Image (cartoon, rainbow, N blue to C red):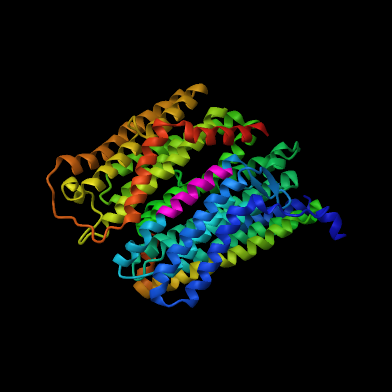
């Protein structure tokens, strides 16, 4: 197995951990953190692949990913605070239920 | 490594191609600053009027930039006929949103300065998303639109349902963006380039990377446009958001999120024609049927229109499955006219919501023609347009989709289109029957109706009929948009 493949497999693993967290967990903050873990999997691939390809586009992409993910999690935490204020900790878990 | 080797010769940006975005960007920053400086009373007049001036200027500059075609910023920004068409309609709808927003928020006894600059930033994101082949630019503008929508959805202070919708949207939006960027990464591994045109013309060996990349990328966009089975956030977000924002999300949001899919449509079809047709066709059929069936049992008008929006994603995806030029034309036409119909129907709801004791229940529509004859008439036209009754744009759109499907002999998909249209009759016609054939349940009175609102509703209603009766106007924009994409 080449180093490139190993890194891609590791990033897939990280990505899947995040995906599982988003789907399975019911805590709002854990769900937010899980989306960030997914994006970190993406970053890992980008940087590892750039080393193999000898280019810099992927590293530039990873900077954008980091910055924008930070913006997104800022909005998410603001929302979590607003939800906790309205319903408290117990009430916040009913958000993850689906309605029809 | 030398920096000159990496970036090549220095290229001056052709700012004239970027002019509409530049004007909206400056408007957004000016609004942001003024929101911090001005006092409460003067904000209410200055912010809406300044945004309106900015959007009108941007609309005019679309005309200027449309005379120049080509790439700029090292090929990361493309100004072509499709981009111009999307920008025209996005700006027009943003202008009509402004007309409704002020009175809607003051009926909630509040004023939100954030609304105006977040609207401008979201619009900017939609405009850039519509005009790029570069994966990084697509990623950043996608996030700009999405984060704007999260904030706009959560705007209503003290409303739990608004926060709930926004949080669901945020989590599933974050998921979709992670999937889309992971797809982008695999495409980058395959071709070593971040330009979609180069990726799809590259002849590499590691085909599985390309397939994996396309699958992830498209799942991400399917989440964004609310295709089944990735639609869970959409009804909650549409219901929770302030109604003018819902109108903006359903029209400009859907328009913008579809454009990257439309852009890779002709590129992808050369390689995977059969698989593409089958996959997209199945998703489209599921989306149409699910959206229409669940809309039948809804009791809340905003949720009903949200499920109708899911169903329309399905109709548009059905045309995306077609591998010919006519499919592309049907997609672009239907996208643009759906933006007009959706904006109009949500605006009517936004006006009704200002009435005393209005709870968005469908039963409240009974006898609306006695209380508000003009509004009821407008709503009837939008309902017939969404259903697809002849003198409206919905009919032309569905006919084009059907024609496109028959060109590719996808008869099963065409049958599903007709079947789901028949199902949708159930709820669209019920609303019209309630408004026109039932006695009134209660007195509905909309306070302080303004000229701007009336003008925008009349404009959208005329557009709903005129774009179908005189299709040459829009066809002269749709046809070159589709042909330049296929010419590559």
Q: Is residue B71 above or below residue B108?
A: above
Q: Which residues are magenta?
A: B83-96
Q: Quadrant of the N terminus of chain B?
A: bottom right
Magenta highlight on residue B449 = no
Give the quarter of the image for residue B162. bottom left
- Residue farthest to the left, as pictured: B439
Q: Is residue B403 above or below residue B206?
A: above
Q: What percent of the width, then of the height, locates residue B216?
A: 59, 46
Magenta highlight on residue B89 = yes
Which residue is pictured at 49% across the width and 76% down the height?
A: B36
Q: Is residue B266 above or below residue B366?
A: above
What's the magenta bit mostly, secondary-structure-wise? helix
Q: Quadrant of the C terminus of chain B?
A: top right
| Frontmost residue, B21 versus B358 | B21
Give the quarter of the image for residue B246. bottom left
Q: Please give left or right for residue B358 compared with residue B173 in the image.
A: left
Which residue is pictured at 23% across the width and 53% down the height?
A: B361
């Amino acid at each position: 197995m080449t180093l490139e493949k190993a890194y891609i497999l590791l990033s897939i693993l990280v990505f899947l951990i995040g995906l599982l967290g988003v789907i399975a967990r019911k805590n709002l903050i854990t769900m937010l953190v899980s989306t960030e873990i997914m994006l970190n999997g993406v970053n890992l691939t980008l940087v590892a692949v750039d080393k193999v390809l000898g280019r810099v586009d992927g590293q530039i992409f990873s900077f954008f990913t980091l910055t924008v993910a930070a913006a997104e999690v800022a909005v998410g935490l603001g929302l979590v605070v607003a939800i906790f204020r309205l319903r408290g900790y117990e009430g916040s878990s009913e958000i993850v239920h689906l309605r029809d | 490594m030398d920096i000159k080797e990496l970036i090549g010769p220095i290229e001056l940006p052709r700012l004239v191609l970027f002019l509409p975005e530049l004007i909206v960007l400056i408007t957004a920053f000016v609004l942001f600053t003024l929101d911090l400086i001005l006092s409460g009373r003067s904000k209410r007049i200055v912010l809406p009027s300044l945004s309106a001036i900015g959007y009108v200027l941007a609309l005019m500059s679309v005309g200027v930039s449309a005379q120049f075609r080509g790439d700029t910023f090292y090929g990361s920004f493309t100004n072509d006929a499709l981009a111009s068409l999307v920008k025209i309609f996005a700006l027009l709808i943003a202008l009509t949103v402004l007309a409704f927003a002020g009175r809607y928020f003051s009926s909630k006894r509040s004023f939100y300065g954030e609304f105006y600059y977040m609207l401008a930033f979201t619009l900017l994101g939609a405009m850039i998303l519509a005009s790029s082949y570069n994966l990084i630019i697509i990623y950043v503008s996608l996030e700009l639109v999405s984060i704007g929508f999260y904030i706009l959805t959560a705007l209503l202070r003290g409303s739990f349902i608004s926060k709930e919708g926004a949080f669901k949207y945020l989590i599933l939006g974050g998921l979709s963006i992670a999937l889309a960027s992971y797809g982008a990464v695999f495409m980058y591994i395959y071709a070593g380039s971040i330009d979609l045109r180069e990726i799809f013309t590259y002849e590499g060996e590691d085909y599985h990377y390309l397939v994996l990349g396309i699958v992830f990328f498209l799942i991400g966009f399917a989440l964004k446009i609310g295709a089944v089975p990735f639609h869970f956030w959409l009804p909650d977000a549409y219901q929770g958001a302030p109604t003018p924002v819902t109108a903006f999300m359903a029209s400009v949001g859907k328009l913008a999120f579809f454009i990257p899919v439309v852009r890779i449509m002709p590129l992808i079809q050369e390689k995977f024609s059969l698989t593409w047709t089958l996959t997209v066709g199945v998703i489209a059929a599921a989306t149409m049927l699910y959206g229409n069936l669940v809309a039948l049992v809804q009791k809340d008008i905003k949720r009903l229109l949200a499920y109708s929006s899911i169903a329309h994603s399905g109709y548009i995806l059905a045309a995306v499955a077609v591998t010919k030029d006519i499919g592309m034309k049907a997609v672009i036409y239907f996208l643009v006219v759906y933006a007009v119909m959706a904006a109009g129907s949500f605006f009517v709801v936004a006006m009704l919501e200002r009435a005393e004791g209005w709870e968005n229940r469908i039963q409240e529509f009974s006898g609306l023609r006695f209380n508000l004859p003009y509004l009821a008439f407008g709503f009837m036209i939008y309902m017939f347009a969404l259903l697809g009754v002849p003198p409206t744009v919905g009919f032309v759109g569905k006919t084009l989709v059907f024609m496109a499907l028959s060109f590719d002999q996808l008869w099963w998909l065409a049958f599903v289109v007709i079947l789901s249209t028949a199902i949708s009759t159930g709820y669209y016609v019920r609303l019209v029957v309630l408004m026109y054939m039932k006695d009134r349940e209660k007195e509905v009175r909309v306070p302080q109706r303004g000229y701007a609102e009336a003008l925008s509703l009349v404009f959208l209603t005329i557009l709903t009929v005129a774009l179908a009766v005189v299709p040459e106007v829009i066809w002269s924009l749709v046809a070159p948009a589709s042909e330049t994409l296929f010419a590559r």
